[in-house]
Amino acid sequence: MDGRLKVLIIGSGPIVIGQAAEFDYAGTQACRALREEGIETVLVNSNPATIMTDAGVADVTYIEPLTVEVLERIIARERPDGLLPTLGGQTGLNLAVALAEAGVLERYGVRLLGTPLAAIQQSEDREAFKQLLISIGEPVPESVAARSVDDAVSFAARVGYPVVVRPAFTLGGTGGGVAKDVADLRAIAARGISASPIGQVLVERSLVGWKEIEYEVMRDRADTCITVCNMENIDPMGVHTGDSIVVAPSQTLTDKEYQMLRSAALRIIRALGIEGGCNIQFGLHPDRSPTADAEAQVPYYVIEVNPRVSRSSALASKATGYPIARVAAKIAIGKRLDEIPNAVTKKTSAAFEPALDYVVVKIPRWPFDKFPPSRRRSRRRSARSRSRASACCGRPRRGSRSPTRGHSSTGSSRARPRMTACGASSRRCGAAPRWTRFTTRRGSIDFFSGRWRRSSVSPRSSCRARRPRPICCAARSASDSPTRTSPR
């Protein structure tokens, strides 16, 4: 043994909607930051298709299921000195809490690095977090922590609809939603209680339509706090942050509003005792108006806190150049912000807040699973109809070199396959004709590929070569000849 400290890092697991490659980025930065300090890193992740599991990122890598039983066996074998759970998304936090409650960390003498266990539990437990905010004077929407559907329905009957359902200890709004009536609430509350590891949902008065503002905040063990960046959602509350267009820094806040929310964010992270990165979300009233009263405050509410590196942290890091995951990893091993050099400027420390003279915009990519089921069915049905059309029309597939009956032999061997007119086949197979090519006397443009093809017929040949023609969506030919193919 060389006496080096050893730290176990929990990865984020599979890349799914709500927990994507941002946590892979954070885990990779954490491994590199710890190795810079001479610390041996042990990485556990169930997803081999990540950068963090590449050779050379961590000293030891385990591709194993992320469960308490598997992690206990790895801890018993590796005997790490500390566990860093705040860089693997909600998966890492939930596993850290489960390991602590099962007595695994105490049994093997593993210290939880970064954010303390009490802070994780307090920020993720909806009722405990609400009471903490009330104790420090921060406004929260009227809400109730429900453990049954009937409790949720009773609260909604008192405050009115719509209401927002937020499950505890979940990521990316999993199991939650906006309920507009009793039927919606019963379905969403049941789903949320099932999704929450502790069977709890927060049912709160809806703030749909309010502005959503986020702050990325850092804190070290010496209670030094900075705000790395603030971000503003283009879409109002009611649209999840991951699905919204986000602008950094905010563009519509006055300086008074910016300082008001910044001060609230610093009070919250200090009250929770978080060491490392933290994401805090606010709802700001949209219908504000200038007033002569200098002490008048725009109404706002604290929505929730993520006591870990979040998806927004990756955006804030890219927007500002401030390496949030790297700094959070160094804070977790006991370093202060003023002791960590800024890896970008090479001159200042991490205790300086970034100043932006530009604007960064994040636009989400829509995965196919986000489409409504009806759209997915129609696409599958369209694909099946194209397959049937190709089979019954008897046309060769794209790339086929075999000659087709009815084609002119001139140039057929060197021509590339393309869509051709097939009115008879369209009637046979039932496929709807589509305009996919516009033909002129000099050539044609394919609407799919955008390629220009010179016509091989004389401009005086026929008027058919001068006007667009409906063609079967599945019929293909092995020739560029404008001659219509006879059905087989």
Image: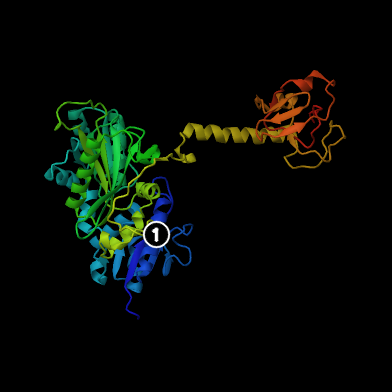
Q: Residue at x 45, y 58 (%)?
A: 47
Which residue is located at x 19 percent, y 33 percent?
155
Q: Residues within 10 Å of mark 1 (few under 14, many from 20)?
A: many
* Image location (x, y in percent) of residue 200: 24, 45
Q: Quadrant of residue 45?
A: bottom left
Residue at image point 26% right, 46% down: 305
* Quadrant where the image shows the N terminus: bottom left
Look at the image and tell me whether residue 12 can be seen. no
The residue indicated by pointer 1 is 29
In which quadrant is the C terminus drawn? top right
Element type at marker 1? helix
Query: Does the rendering let one see residue 432?
Result: yes
Residue 179 or residue 172, whichever sits in front: 172
399 relative to 432 in the view: left or right: right
Q: Residue furthest right?
A: 409
User: With 76 as the anchor, is 371 left or right in this view?
Assistant: right
Residue 195: percent from left, percent from top? 32, 46
Disc 1 residue type (three-letter) = Gln
Depicted 410 relative to depicted 442: above or below: below
Residue lying farthest to the top in this orientation:
463
Whole-percent x and y of residue 12? 38, 55
Q: Residue furthest front?
A: 347
